[in-house]
Amino acid sequence: MLNHMDRVKMIEFKDMGDERGQLVVVEGGIDIPFEIRRAFYIYGSDATVVRGKHANKKTEFVLINVAGTSKVKVMDGAGNEAIFCLNRPNTGIYLPNMVWKEMYDFSPDSVLLVLASEHYDASEYIRDYDEYVKEISSFAFSSEN
C-alpha cells in the first residue's frame, strides 16, 4: 500500500542572517519539492482553534510558522498519525497530497505561512474524515495497479 505518511517530512531552510538580522529564502523546486502556485498565511487563531481538517487530492503543501508556534497533526486514514511542532521560522513541514492535516495550538503571535503546489480548487478538497478514509483506500488500491 502506498504510504503517504512516509513522504511527510520536516525541512530546514538555510538561515542567511548577519548583524542586520535574519533572512530565510524558500524557492520552489529547490528548497521545497514543488513549484509554488499559491501562498497564504493564517494568523489571529487562538490555541483552541483547529484549522485545516481536510486532505487534498492533488495539492502538496509546505507549512512554516514565520512567527510564533503551532502544531500540525497529520493522519493517513489507516490509523497512523504524527504531530509536528512548528516553532522556528527557518523550518517547515512538507505535506504531500492525500494526507489529512489539522493545525492547532496556535500561540498568540502565530503566523503560519502555507505554500501550495496548486491554485485553489474546492473540488479537490476532502473535508469529511470518513470520506477521506474511503477515498484513501481506493486511492492506494488504484496506485498499486
Image (spheres, rainbow, N blue to C red):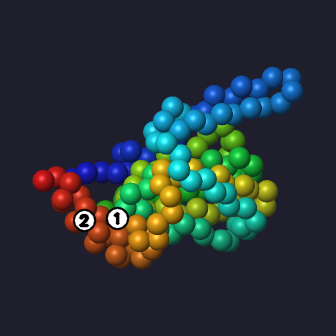
Left or right: residue 17 versus residue 30 is right
Left or right: residue 78 versus residue 70 is left
Circle 1 crowding by C-alpha within 10 Å: few under 14, some 14–19, many from 20? many
* Earlier residue among tags 1 and 2: 1
Residue 21 position, x and y percent, is 83, 30
Residue 119 position, x and y percent, is 50, 58
Circle 2 crowding by C-alpha within 10 Å: few under 14, some 14–19, many from 20? some
Give the SS element for disc 1: loop
Residue at 73 percent of width and 68 percent of height: 46
User: Looking at this rendering, what residue extends furthest in the top direction?
Assistant: 18
Residue 50 position, x and y percent, is 60, 69
Separation of residues labelled 1 and 2 (CA atoms)? 8 Å
Give the SS element for disc 2: helix
Amino acid type of the residue tagged 2 in the rendering: Ser
Residue 38 position, x and y percent, is 56, 53
Q: Is residue 50 above or below residue 59?
A: below
User: Looking at this rendering, what residue extends furthest in the left direction?
Assistant: 145
Residue at 68 percent of width and 71 percent of height: 48
Residue 77 shows which numbered tag? 1
Left or right: residue 17 versus residue 118 is right
Residue under label 2? 137
Residues marked 1 and 2 touching at CB (< 8 Å): yes
User: Can residue 124 be seen from the camera position used here?
Assistant: yes
Left or right: residue 135 versus residue 87 is left
Amino acid type of the residue tagged 1 in the rendering: Gly
Residue at 77 percent of width and 26 percent of height: 17
Q: Is residue 44 above or below residue 127?
A: above
Residue at 73 percent of width and 61 percent of height: 43
Number of numbered discs on residues: 2
Q: Nearer the viewer, mark 1 or mark 2?
A: 2
User: Can residue 81 be seen from the camera position used here?
Assistant: no
